[in-house]
Amino acid sequence: MGNIWDKHPESMRDQSDDMDARSPANHQSPWLPFETRRRARDEKREAVLRTAVALFLEQGYHRTTLNDVAERLNITKPALYNYFGGKDEILFECWAIGNERVDDCITEIAAGGGKGLDKLRKLIVRYAEVMTTDYGKSLVRFDVRDLTEHNRKVVNTAKKKIDRAFRDYISDGISDGTIKPCDPKLSAFAIAGSLNWIGHWFQPGGPMTGDAVAEQFAIRLTEGIATPSMRKKADKPPRKGNAPREDGSEHHARTAARAAGQSKRARSRLR
Amino acid sequence: MGNIWDKHPESMRDQSDDMDARSPANHQSPWLPFETRRRARDEKREAVLRTAVALFLEQGYHRTTLNDVAERLNITKPALYNYFGGKDEILFECWAIGNERVDDCITEIAAGGGKGLDKLRKLIVRYAEVMTTDYGKSLVRFDVRDLTEHNRKVVNTAKKKIDRAFRDYISDGISDGTIKPCDPKLSAFAIAGSLNWIGHWFQPGGPMTGDAVAEQFAIRLTEGIATPSMRKKADKPPRKGNAPREDGSEHHARTAARAAGQSKRARSRLR
DNA sequence: ACCTTTTCTTACCCATGGGTAATATATGGG
DNA sequence: CCCATATATTACCCATGGGTAAGAAAAGGT
């Protein structure tokens, strides 16, 4: 494994021998085994999503049951319906978190200005980084057809926006001379394809961190279309022995970043 | 009850007077409405796979029922079990056909010799072409986790082989000076990602034929890593108004090409 | 303490769909 | 024409899993 393809290691995570409340399996769940359940509602909602997205990626959406999700949180299936209207809504919200991150990148880059090639590079780096996280992977690993008609439209609109960003920055680059003349549509496909595929093979804990991958991809994916004078030095072979990043880094970043964005998404079926 | 809007009253199937065998709806199925079912076994097997792969891509594996497959072939679900041991076996065989095509490319290219960059370009072209066909898309759209333990191993072995081909050709190119020094693993990821993604967006009947896409990708994906002297002219913007290819082309090519390869695959559960 | 609201559990329902058993129909050889 | 074999059909089985109903157990206000 570690090849260009998916690797889906069989999950080995249950250590069910021990009923102790502080057993490591329950460490990240706000529902500590049978008491002390006084967290805020939103915190629990997020815990559901965090667990769900992990399971959906591990096992696939259709092979993951709501019982699986509930079990990992020390609750039972119907409890989930206090926070979500159904399985497909959970799926959608996972996707929405990932999309929000990409959307923030686009907004930020659009505000920042700069030459076409620079904007493209920025987008590649940021997009690649997102693609190495669980919620980012949602964007490419989840199947739109599992959503309701309405949510499917939302997703498709968002995808078009991302596609436009790639194409526009390439077009900008061609106009301002930082990118060689080429077909923006096709180049966008090629670049986005490479990046999206990261969501299929990247596993944290591997030889490279997500940031390192992003950096390398930004170089590789632009060296072909950049105007000769604009090319970076590149091609120092990527550092191999990177220290794997600490476990919670993604988590902290996410939770912090979302507090603001939370209200952006529709809170449907709040009951 | 029994008005004209009723879909399929059981009695309809029996009376062959009004249901002409040459009715257009049944045009591509060997099981013409209720008689004249004398095709060879293998032809029917292939028809099942052809229908199945199309449906799996259209609707997704889990949303496609065996009844869907059977219905489109004018038969009933249990009839499928004359040819396949189960749903997952159908999935596997679809994948196997796609893999066979890629495998043939690799064998051919390995036999052909040439510089690293040329071999890489050849592989990209051929792989991209495969990726624009239904069976090729199987390789990247189907989920390994839907297969049996045994078949999953087969798939993973095959994927490793494809991965090796990409990496080896890149390494060869670096050795013989046709490719700039770079990390073969990462470059293989980037290139294969782009190509695999074709299987997610390409639709025949669009502005470009599969071959045109393949040709363009071969240029774009190698211009970044090729040694300066080895770069192709490229960058004549791709022709836009391509005539969509005729309907049956993929079909004919496939049927012909497979007659030989048929025996290669294990014919499990032949009963 | 008491009542209300929220949250969670136990115990169900039931549609779906893969797979099987028994049986009918076609096919092809002698 | 009859029988053996291959192939299809009808009528089932039943595990799975999303979703719901009813009520217990916290939480919270007063």
Image: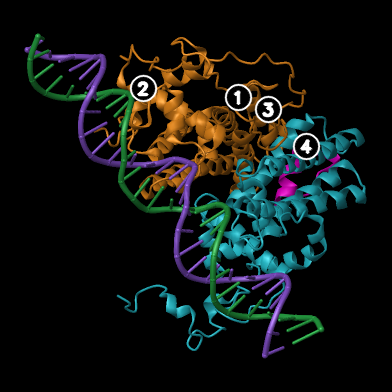
Chain colours: A orange, B cyan, C green, D purple
Question: Which residue is under mark 1?
Answer: A12
Front tag of 2 and 4: 2
Amino acid tagged 1? Met
The answer to which of A192 and B21 lies nearer the viewer is B21
> Residue A1, percent across and down?
72, 31
Residue A35, quarter of the rendered image:
top left
Q: Are marks 3 and 2 on the same chain?
A: yes
**How far across and down, in percent of the image, does residue B137 sit?**
64, 52
Cα separation between marks 1 and 4: 39 Å
Q: Nearer the viewer, residue A142 or A232?
A: A142
Part of the protein shown in magenta: B216-233
Please state the chain letter of the residue tagged with numbered disc 2 in the rendered image. Answer: A
The image shows residue A205 at horizontal and vertical percentages of 64, 20
Instruction: Point out the tag, 1 or 3, that comes first from the N-terminus.
Output: 1
Residue at the spot 82% in from the left edge and 53% down from the top edge: B104
**Tags 2 and 4 on a common chain:** no
- 3D distance between C-alphas at marks 3 and 2: 37 Å
The residue where tag 3 is placed is A216
Distance in Å between CA atoms under marks 2 and 4? 48 Å
Residue at the spot of label 2: A44
